[in-house]
Amino acid sequence: MTNRTYIKDLGQHVGETVTIACWVDVRRDQGKMVFFDFRDMSGKVQGVVLPSATEAMESAKEIRTEWVLEVGGIVNKRPERNIQTDKQNGDIELEVRSIKILNKAETPPFEINTDTSGVGEDVRLKYRYLDLRSDRMQKNIRMRDNIISFIRAFLHKEQFIEVETPILTKSTPEGARDYVVPSRLYQGMFYALPQSPQQYKQLLMAGGVERYFQIAKCMRDEDTRGDRQPEFTQLDLEMSFVEREEVMALNEALLIAIVQTLYPKKKIQQIPFPRISYKDAMEKYGIDRPDIREDKNDPNLLAFCWVVDFPFFERTEKSDNPDAQGDWTYTHNPFSRPIEEHMTNLMEKKDLGDILTTQYDVILNGYEIGGGSIRNHAYDALAKVFEILGHKTENIEKDFGHMLHAFKTGTPPHGGIAWGLDRLIMLLQNEPNIREVIAFPKTGEGRDLMMDAPSEISEKQLKELGIQLKK
C-alpha cells in the first residue's frame, strides 16, 4: 500500500486527506454517525463516519471489531472541549470518507482492546495471534526487540561478532535432559538439540574469533515453571584473553545501559552492583540468588548483584546405595576453571569440596538472569574435571574428544556468560512469567495449544526413521 500513512504520523497531516491500513479496535454506532477506534502497529486514532459519506456509512453499518480495513479520510483537529491530552492522537480525529474491507473477522473469543492477562491462559495460548494484537502484548514484544537491538549495537561497538551455532548437535552427558532428533540417513542414531551453545562458543575461541555473541535458542527437556520453558532464548557471549573481572565489568555496563536507555523510569538500587560470595549468600539469605531490594513494593526498583566464589564440586548421592558417600558432580558447569589458587588441588584431586570456581551469577530481584565463568582452556585440566566427575577414560574421549583436541591446538584463555533473556525481559516489563514476553510460548506442561504440539507422526514417517513405537 504505497500511499499508506501510519497512525502515529497522522498528527503531521492535519487538513490533509490520508489513507490508513488498520484493524477496528472499537466500534460505536450512534445512529446518524458511527465512531471507530482504528489500530495499526504504530498506535490508535478515533475515526468518525458522517451521514454525508453515504458509501462509507453503508460499510460502517456492517463492520465489526477486528475487521481489517483500508480507510481514506481527512485528518481534522478536534474541538478544544473534545481534546484528550492523555491519549495518543487525542487532539485529532479522522473524518472517514471511504472504507475498503480487506478482511472480515469472526467475533473473537476474548476482548482484544483490553488487558488480556485476566483471560484464561489456555484460551490466550490457543489464539495467541489474537492475544498478540493487545496493547500489552504488543508493548512486550516490541520492547523485546528494542532490548535485543540495543544489545547487538552495544556488543558490536565492543568488537564482538555475532556467530550462529548449530541446532542439530551431539548429545553429551552433562546438563539437563536433551531433546533428541532421529536421523533418517543414519538410522538408530540421533542428533540432540542444544541446551546451550556452551561447547560451540568455546570452540569459536579455539577458532580465533576472540569476541563472540549470539541471541541463541536453547532447548532443555526439564520440568517447566513460570520463568522456564522447554525452549528459551539466551544472550550468549564469550571473550578470549580475559579474566573474571573483565567479563563481569562488560556485562554490568551492558545491563546498566539497557536500563538507563530503555527504562529511564526504573532505578538501579546500587551501582556498581554489589558482590556477594556464595557462602555469605547462603548464610544470610538461605539462597544463592538473593532478592536484596530495599523496597520490594517498588515495581521500578532493580536490585542487581553478583554472586561469586561458588564451590566447583558437590557430593551427589548414589542411587543404588543411599548410605554410601556420593560421587562428585559439578555445581554449575564442568567447563569452568577453578580460581587460580585452587588449580593445584584440582590437578591433584584433593580437598575437592573446598575448590572454588571462577563462576559468577548475576541476580536481579531474586532471579538469576545470567551465569558464566572463566573456562578451563587447558587440555589436562579439563580432562581432570571429567575424571573427578567419574567419566571413564574411553567415554571422555567419545563424548568430549572434540573439546579436548581443540584445547591441544593453542586455545587462548577465555570466559563468558549466558543471560536468560526471556527472564530479564519479564522482570523489566513487570510481568509475572516469561510466557508474557515470548511470542509463541508453550504451556506450563510444555504444550503448544495453538499448533497442537507435540503430536503423533504418521506410520510412514516412523518407517522412514526406522522407529517402531511400543504399544
Image: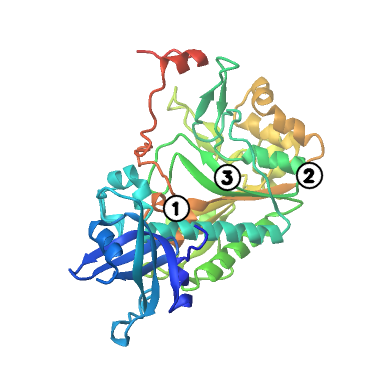
Residue 224 lies, with reference to residue 275, above or below; the image says above
Q: Badge 1 is on which residue? A: 287
Image disc number at residue 216: 3
Residue 345 seen in this snapshot: no
Q: Nearer the viewer, residue 384 or 227?
A: 227
Name the residue type under label 1. Ile
Look at discs 2 and 1 and give the one toward the viewer.
Answer: 2
What element does badge 3 sit on? strand
* Residues at marks 2 and 1, CA–CA distance in whole angstroms: 38 Å
Image disc number at residue 71: none
Please give left or right for residue 131 compared with residue 360 in the image.
left
Name the residue type under label 2. Gly
Image disc number at residue 208: 2
Of mark 2 and mark 1, the one earlier in the sequence is 2
Residue 175 lies, with reference to residue 433, above or below; the image says above
What element does badge 1 sit on? loop
- Answer few, some or many: residues within 10 Å of disc 1's Cα (few below 14, many 20 plus, some between 14 and 19): some
* Residues at marks 2 and 3, CA–CA distance in whole angstroms: 20 Å
Look at discs 2 and 3 and give the one toward the viewer.
Answer: 3
Of mark 3 and mark 1, the one earlier in the sequence is 3
Image coordinates of residue 290 in percent, x first then y, are 45, 58
Instruction: Locate the C terminus by quadrant.
Output: top left
Image coordinates of residue 401 in percent, x first then y, are 70, 27
Name the residue type under label 3. Ala
